[in-house]
Amino acid sequence: MELLLQAFSWLLTPESWTQQGGALQRLFEHLGVTIGVVALSAGIALPLGVMIGHTRRWTTAVALLAGAARAIPTLGLLTLLGLALGIGLGAPVLALLVLAAPPLLAGAYAGVQAVDRAAVDGARSVGMSEAQIIRSVELPLALPVIVGGIRSATLQVVATATLAAYTSDTGLGRYIFSGLKSRDYPELIAGSLLVIALALLLDGSFALLMKRHASAPRSDLKTTTTSPGRNPS
């Protein structure tokens, strides 16, 4: 209990936030690494997952690959990459990319694959191209599942990004590693509390986003009949 009180005292001390390398700087570094990794991973995994869900090909192989990637220990992978790449952000970013990809990929292809085939066939019957079907039919209907995958990946990355301090002086993990090394347990606990608070803040943001999406008015998907040989305007 005393250590926890000391940790809160550390958090309430202005110098802990304003000094060079203080908590505010570490917080933005941690958030930057998280957003950067998730954005980069999403740029690769989401289009791939959407195409797999749309074509319904290679789903078994992708499921096996995603499961295997989830089983890789991040710290072990970070250690190997750190030995290969040396000190810096390269190793933790690559390790976190491997961590973030499976939920993003799974969310994208599962969401698109779950779209009612009747809606897809109806869009195809009125002359929509495959790209139009993906953009106008499948993605809007699959959005909650896709966002759920992004949410899961973000929470995993924000928690595991503490390991970035293992090979670089970056993020909130620095307090955990330095506190453990110097036996400064209040600092260690304070760093852990900041990571938890950031994870809760991001999770709450996603929950609010999904709540607003669920309550937003939606226009029903309409299928229009056209004469043979004509595309809808």
Image: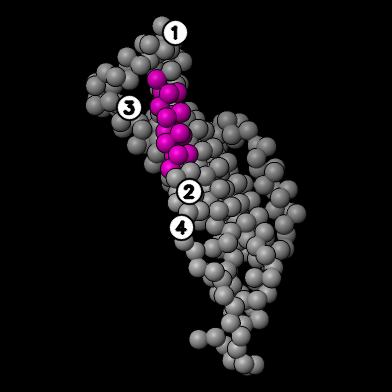
Q: Amino acid at mark 2?
A: Lys
Callout 4 secondary element: loop
Above or below, 2 against 53 in this view is above
Image mark for residue 1: 1
Residue under label 2, please give it.
Answer: 211
Q: Quadrant of residue 58?
A: bottom right
Above or below, 179 against 200 in this view is above
In this rendered view, identify the residue nearer to me: 123 or 26. Answer: 123
Q: Residues within 10 Å of mark 2 (few under 14, many from 20)?
A: few
Report whether residue 3 is seen.
yes
Tag 4 or tag 3, which sits nearer the N-term? 3
Callout 1 secondary element: loop
Tag 4 or tag 2, which sits nearer the N-term? 2
Mark 1 against mark 2, which lies toward the viewer?
2
Q: Marks 3/1: CA distance?
A: 22 Å
First to last magenta residue range: 190-205
Q: Amino acid at mark 4?
A: Ala
- The spot of residue 75 in percent (x, y) is 57, 30
Mark 1 against mark 4, which lies toward the viewer?
4
Residue under label 4, please give it.
Answer: 216
Tag 1 or tag 3, which sits nearer the N-term? 1
In this rendered view, identify the residue nearer to me: 96 or 212. Answer: 212
Q: Quadrant of residue 192?
A: top left
Q: Marks 1/2: CA distance?
A: 37 Å
Tag 2 or tag 3, which sits nearer the N-term? 3
Asked if the residues shown at circle 3 and circle 1 are in contact, with their CB atoms under 8 angstroms apart, the answer is no
Instruction: Assess whether residue 60 is covered by the magenta stretch.
Output: no
**Quadrant containing the N terminus in the rendered view:** top left
Is 101 on the left or on the right of 217, as rendered? right
Q: Residues within 10 Å of mark 1 (few under 14, many from 20)?
A: few
